[in-house]
Amino acid sequence: MSSDAEILKTFPAAAEYLTNIHLICRDYGHAANHRLADWLGVSTSAVTQALGRLKKIGLVNQERYEHVFLTDAGRALALKVLKRHYLLEHLLVKTLDFPWDKSDEEAKVLQNQISDDLAEHLDARLGFPQTCPHGNPLPGTEVEAKLLAAPRLPAAIVGSSVVVVRITEEGEGLPTMLPFCQTAGIKPGVRVKVEASGPEGVTLKVGDRPSVLVAAVLAKHVCYDPEL
Ligand SMILES: [Fe+2]
């Protein structure tokens, strides 16, 4: 099989497919073509075509019309790309002061271009970060299990105040999510007061800002630490 660098060079979309299959399997137990198409913003026929290519090079398994799974090699590449993505976001936001809500898109472009050596160097120079600036845990870190299990805003008790710890990867993929959070001041480490909660969403008070309704479609991607 070709090297990781060759795969990413000749088939750049592989990175997005593999990381998204990994995240969907992790969060939903299995990945179906239509969910993958939703997450990636492409047609199901584009998904079918890309999966055929990934299957050919041994990175995914899929029986006809069944769920798709990563092979060991596919998972290893997905985790490698995901880690690079988080490190690049960290570099952009924490070191270069690049806007928090725009770093995900930029990191997606850069993640295929850097070498393993540069990724290792970045990891060390950034102090081996455990999360991306949006609170998503780097694979294999100590905080991973706790962050992945953190409850979502609709579960918070009305009247309580909680500390935001994570905007999920699925949330990061929604076009309105990060710009909304940026404007409303909803970021990891920020304490928010839950003023109301219902089918339309969750109303928060963030510092001195006017109360804000976080629409249900976004609120389910904001995780908090119930112990803080
Ligand atoms: Fe992120």
Image: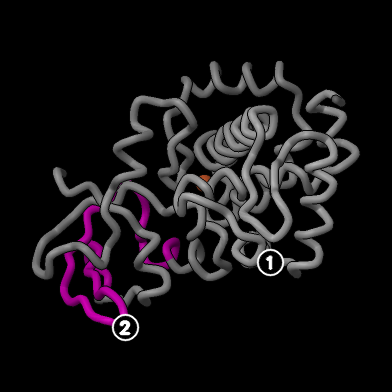
Q: Is residue 92 left or right of residue 181?
A: right
- The residue positioned 58% from the left and 68% from the top of the image is 175
Respond yes or no on whether mark 2 lies under 8 Å from ligand 1. no
User: Which image quadrant is residue 145 in?
Assistant: top left
Q: Residue at x 84, y 34 (%)?
A: 7
Q: Out of 20 and 191, give the one closest to the viewer.
A: 20
Tag count? 2
Name the image quarter holding residue 2.
Answer: top right
Task: Determine the secondary structure under disc 1.
Answer: loop
Q: Mark 1 sits on what residue?
A: 41
Q: Residue furthest front?
A: 64
Q: Is the CB atom of the residue marked by disc 1 within 8 angstroms of ligand 1's nearest atom?
A: no
x and y percentages locating residue 118 in the rendered image: 70, 21
Q: Which residues are magenta?
A: 181-209
Residue 186 on the magenta span: yes
Where residue 80 sits: x, y (%)? 63, 29
Residue toward you, 20 or 99: 20
Of 117 and 75, which appears nearest the observer?
75
| Rendering quarter of residue 32 | bottom right
Mark sitting on residue 8? none
Which quarter of the figure is the C terminus placed in?
top left
Residue type (three-letter) at the residue carrying disc 2 = Glu
How far across and how far down the image is residue 126, in percent?
A: 52, 24
Q: Residue at x 41, y 54 (%)?
A: 167
Q: Earlier in the sequence, mark 1 or mark 2?
A: 1
Lateral position of residue 5 relative to residue 220, left or right: right
Q: Amino acid at mark 1?
A: Gly
> Residue 221, percent across and down?
40, 60
Using the image as rendered, state which of residue 65 and residue 93 is in the foreground: 65
Dot label at residue 200: 2
